[in-house]
Amino acid sequence: MADTGKPLLIKRYASRRLYNTETSDYVTLEDISQFIREGRDVQIIDLKSGDDLTRQYLLQIIADHESRGENVLPINVLNDLVRSYTTQATSVVPEFLAASFEMLRDGQSQLLENMTKGNPMASMPGMEAMRAQQEAFMKAMTGGMGGLSGMSGPRAEEAEPRKDGDLDDIKAQLAELQRQLARMGK
């Protein structure tokens, strides 16, 4: 692929076919899902109207995975998401979800780092296989959204180990956001 610094532009034709502008060929939703798993951002534009359809197609990819039994989102989370569209919570939900996924990525990075660097157990037989399994599990849980091995670009250079107090502060903030969302949902 060409420039991985900017989103891959996909054009949707009137026939609803999706066209990859970098490789000059048609792609499927599964292809787009694979680009995203590989760490590439995509932007899907309707050729005729110029409308950005990215959100619509990303939601369709998620719905397809969920309908095939690849359940990542628990029912209570789905219910809360639906409720958030009908309450005043819509203003806080996107930031909350973004912060939650960032914490998950950071936690993944920290866990993998602890399993390799400076850990006397890292040299034990079988530990490398366990670390690889843990990395695969975390990658599956986050949809390949980065982590220790997947971090690149400015975020990777800026990443610093967190102090325990920082993590406790973040957990407290997250708990407070959850309480606020629960109150808004009632």
Image (spheres, rainbow, N blue to C red):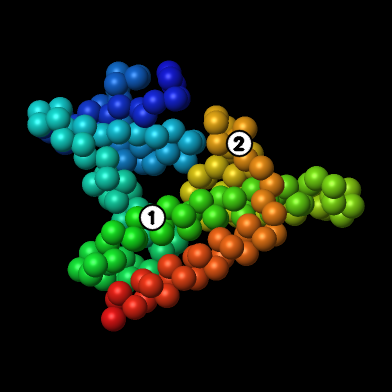
Badges 1 and 2: C-beta atoms under 8 Å apart?
Answer: no
Residue 57 vs residue 67, the one in the foreground: 57
**Residue 104 in the image: x percent, y percent?**
55, 55
Label 2 SS: helix
Locate residue 27, reporting x and y percent: 31, 31
Q: Which residue corresponds to the image point at 70% horizontal and 59% vertical from the top-left?
A: 164
Amino acid type shown at disc 1: Glu
Of 98 and 16, which appears nearest the observer?
98
Is 17 on the left or on the right of 152, as rendered? left
- When asked about the image quadrant of residue 121, the answer is bottom right
Q: Does residue 139 appear to the left or right of 52 in the view shown?
A: right
Task: Identify the amino acid type marked 2.
Answer: Glu
User: Is disc 1 surrounded by few (<14), some (14 to 19) or many (20+) residues within 10 Å?
Assistant: few
Residue at the (80%, 45%) spot, across then down: 117
Q: Which residue is mark 2?
A: 158
Picture layout, residue 140 above or below residue 47: below
* Mark identifier at residue 95: 1
Q: Earlier in the sequence, mark 1 or mark 2?
A: 1
Asked whether the viewer can see residue 74, the reply is: no
Q: Is residue 161 left or right of residue 90?
A: right
